[in-house]
Amino acid sequence: MLISDYGISNGTFLICSFWLVSALAAVGRTQRARDLMERLLAVASPLGLYAEEFDTANGRHLGNFPQAFSHLALIEAAGRIILAELIEEI
């Protein structure tokens, strides 16, 4: 589920979607976090970059491109998933 799935008609702020991944991983919903992360990774530009927003209706990146904050949130989300998986192994 992307933030846009909640009925927001503008572009989806990618930082918020990555924050949702982090939150899901932090509360133990690791599989949902992984699934959402896979969806977000699939919408990267051909160069693997992210803009500020993503228009889910037409698959276009919107706003500032590339957006550093989106990439920082991606790194945080990946780290949260890795940490959650390590904790599950214990």
Image (cartoon, helix red, strand yellow):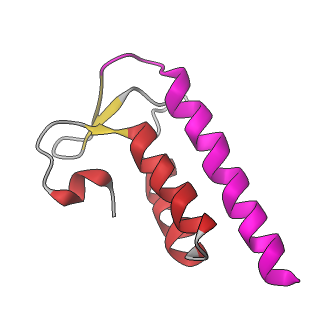
Residue 63: x percent and y percent?
30, 20
Q: Residue furthest right?
A: 90
Q: Residue at x 41, y 26 (%)?
A: 51
Residue 73: x percent and y percent?
57, 39
41, 75: nearer the viewer: 75
Q: Residue at x 38, y 27 (%)?
A: 52
59, 34: nearer the viewer: 34
40, 20: nearer the viewer: 20
Image height check: is 74 above or below 50?
A: below
Does the rendering let one see residue 42? Answer: no
Inspect the magenta stretch and tell me whether residue 73 lies in it: yes
Inspect the magenta stretch and tell me whether residue 65 lies in it: yes
Residue 79: x percent and y percent?
72, 52
Does the rendering let one see residue 59? Answer: yes
| 34 relative position to 40: left or right | right
| 72 relative position to 84: left or right | left
Q: Quadrant of residue 87?
A: bottom right
Total numbered labels placed on residues in the image: 0
Q: Residue at x 49, y 73 (%)?
A: 32
**Which quadrant: the N terminus?**
bottom left
**Which quadrant: the C terminus?**
bottom right
Magenta region, main secondary structure: helix
Q: Quadrant of residue 7?
A: bottom left
Residue 13: x percent and y percent?
33, 37
Image height check: is 89 above or below 48?
A: below
- Give the magenta part as a residue range: 63-90
Q: Residue furthest front?
A: 27
Q: Residue at x 57, y 32 (%)?
A: 71
Image height check: is 60 above or below 24?
A: above
